Image: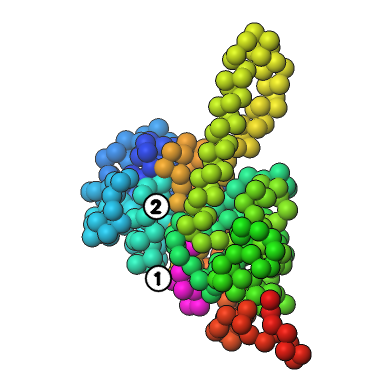
Amino acid sequence: MSLPRIAVDAMGGDEGVRVMIEGAALARRRHDRFKFLLVGDEAKIAQALDHHPNLRGASEILHAPEAVAGDERPTQALRRARTTSMGLAIDAVKRGEAGAAVSGGNTGALMAMAKLALRTMPGIDRPALAALLPTLGTHDLVMLDLGANTDCDARNLFQFALMGAAYARIVHGLDSPRVRLLNIGTEETKGTDDLRDAAALLKHAAASLALTFDGFTESDKLSRGDFDVVVTDGFSGNIALKAMEGAARFVGDLLRRSFASSLRSKIGFLISKPATETLKHHLDPNNHNGAVFLGLNGVVVKSHGSASAMGVANAVAVTARLLEENLIERIAADVAAVDPDTIRQPARRRVANTEGETAL
């Protein structure tokens, strides 16, 4: 099957061209149907392609004289969008010259450029950043928003749930993903008004949605694998994500320190090495790389800035999967299936049945 080509911001990421091109080449070796538009410094990209002939024949280079710096303000990056590799990669999606864009660059700039160029889909107020997190279950957890929106109301959270469920159906092949809202407790009375309103909206519309709403969850349950999608505002989501990443690094560092503390510990490490290698693989962010901005009129995927070539290849694979499975069309269909009156006002303060009982 031939897919729309993927625009790669070759200058994005901590190591820039070398890792981005190597990652695209690895993805191409795994899936020979991939085609690429490589955006960045033409001379550097051409030099990198000398080491990857399999990628050269499946790619076109679009020269961009500038790159977005990692610490650059989104407003500054926006003014240079037409001359940067990130801006031109997104513009290629807007003009239909690529089906999707992948970048390992500045997240804030990527969000600002993508939102301005591609706009949000009809029925979606704000895009959200979604990623896959490792769990003890059979598949990863879809979590959103992870930083695109620091302040969200009930309507935003409801829309995030729709988009997250559509994403989970694609990446995990689920018919009705189990969705929960991140909260400070599982009781219906816990949390802000917006969280309780969002819960009421999801309960009220559950019968017409391709998802199962399971109520609230606390952050310590995110890795259990008991549900498929967790929805939150970008402020809380980003804090939760960084806390999980820090805990994973802490466990890894603690194990390394413990195993090096004595001869007996070193022997124990050799005995337990298969288990520690499994742990390392499970927690390696490269194996879960590829966060997607949901809700835009186009597919834009954010790769970790520090991703290895394998991580970039995984982000490219995620991107291709979303194109192949028609993510945009699926979200649009889910939004169209929702009765507009359902989200016109907070459901918590609306009569839920003919007996006059409120939703909460």
Which mark, residue 119?
Answer: 1
Report the residue that reaches farthest toward the right: 355
Which residue sits at x=34%, y=67%?
116
Report the residue that reaches farthest toward the top: 263
Quadrant housing the N terminus: bottom right
SS assignment for the magenta stretch, majority = loop
SS at badge 1: loop
Q: Position of residue 108 (x, y in %)?
A: 37, 55
Q: Which residue is mark 2?
A: 107
Q: In front: 247, or 336?
A: 247
Q: Which residues are magenta?
A: 120-130
Quadrant housing the C terminus: bottom right
Q: Is residue 126 magenta?
A: yes
Observer-side mark, 2 or 1, equals 2
Q: Is residue 318 visible to us here?
A: no
Which residue sits at x=47%, y=57%?
235
Horizontal side of 234 relative to 180 (left or right) equals: left
Q: Is residue 351 above or below residue 94?
A: below
Q: Position of residue 83 (x, y in %)?
A: 24, 55
